[in-house]
Amino acid sequence: MSTVLVVNSGSSSVKFQVVDPDSGHSVLQGIVERIGDADGRVAVTRGDDTTEKTTDIPDHVTGLRLAFEMMTDAGLPLAEAGITAVGHRVVHGGTVFSEPTLIDDSVVATIDELSALAPLHNPANLRGIEVARRELPDVPQVAVFDTAFFHTLPAAASTYAIDAATAAKHDIKRYGMHGTSHEYVSGRVAEYLGRSPSDVNQIVLHLGNGASASAVRGGVAVDTSMGLTPLEGLVMGTRSGDIDPGIVMHLRRSADMDVDAIDELLNRRSGIKGLSGVTDFRELRRLIDDGDEAAALAFDVYVHRLRRYLGAYMIELGHVDVVTFTAGVGENSAEVRAAALADLEMYGIELDEERNTERGKGIRVISTDDSPVTVLVVPTNEELAIARAAVALIG
């Protein structure tokens, strides 16, 4: 068995999978949660069996080492998993990295330098790299960047209208995030339709706790909603998405909030949570059904922003073949899909209500047979995409 260990290291958790890149099968998966807490949790799942442990997890090193040890309890010791490469999700590649990259000390240093562009993400990604390099020193380690798919954005889409010299000095431009998911899903759409990616114009809506939209023309990304950071764009679980930049100065002057406090507000206390108090759309739906006006408003604001991007990208592409929903909310919330596409028949989008509400695990069509624009739900699989990118790089 030849597998790839895929590591997605966040600020307080680490998700990992052992993936067979040929079949796409997830051999084993695990999560380390609540890092830094006395009641940290590690869970390793193989098949239908899950091994769990709750303990003090002071740091990423301790958590991942414990998880690797628990792989033995799950019947697949790390040394016997056939791991030929480790693929790491890294959020921000800046202008330096536009494709999967073999990790060495210089690459680690550069990712660290790019932390200024993703202070909540790149440092956490580096902690996962540090542990994996230490535990598997003889296995090639590959960084796969969330921003890479969007390096093709035309200048008109990637350039912010601020002083050009300031932008150049501080690497300020639209980079986009969730690129691994957008690339994987757009490729799966073309494969499912039996068409070459170059023949398909599509809008991909990655709707999870983090959310982003992309316009993909002929397999090439031409626009996306996230920008310099993952904060721009759609309304998200805890992030505001687009706001008037003047709000930042207003909060500084009128509320005496410093940069860190504003950062905390916009990244962790805004979005659906800031408007309704919850982030889970199932809970939001329950609150709406109970007559909660704040929850209803949160849903409406979320959909309003989503439709704004959908309309913009339809105009930008000129001709749209497919609109695709993916990620947790996109794949599971029929209400969001229906609201986002309501009354768009004049634009060639005809949603089939029955298909939209049916549950399913694979790719499925939720538009009518006569709809000029095909609407799809496509499960994303960033881990498989990272695994295959790592294998392709190391040959």
Image (tube, rainbow, N blue to C red):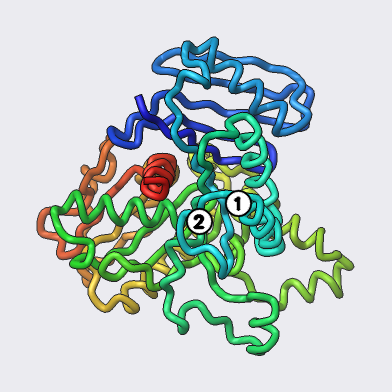
Mark 1 is surrounded, within 10 Å at the Cα level, by few (under 14), some (14 to 19) or many (20 or more) other residues, namely: some
Q: In which quarter of the image is residue 13?
A: top right
Which residue is the site of mark 2?
A: 146
Q: Is residue 26 above or below residue 326?
A: above
The picture places residue 226, in percent across and down from the top left corner, at 53, 65
**Residue 330 shows in this picture:** no
Q: Horizontally, is 78 left or right of 57 in the view?
A: left
Mark 2 is surrounded, within 10 Å at the Cα level, by few (under 14), some (14 to 19) or many (20 or more) other residues, namely: many
In this view, which residue lies farthest toward the left? 370
Do labels 1 and 2 touch, CB within 8 Å? no
Q: Which residue is drawn at 27% across and 50% down?
A: 188
Name the quadrant of the N terminus: top left
In this view, which residue lies farthest toward the right? 256
Q: Mark 2 belongs to which amino acid?
A: Asp
The picture places residue 95, in percent across and down from the top left corner, at 56, 70
How far is disc 1 from disc 2 in space, using C-alphas?
A: 33 Å
Return the residue nearer the eye: 87 or 369: 87
Badge 2 element:
loop
Q: Residue at x 28, y 54 (%)?
A: 187
The picture places residue 325, in percent across and down from the top left corner, at 35, 52
Q: In this view, does 223 lie above or below 163?
A: above
Please tell me whether mark 1 or mark 2 is closer to you in this view: 2
In this view, which residue lies farthest toward the front? 138
Return the residue nearer the eye: 294 or 210: 210
Return the residue nearer the eye: 266 or 67: 67
Which residue is the site of mark 1?
A: 294
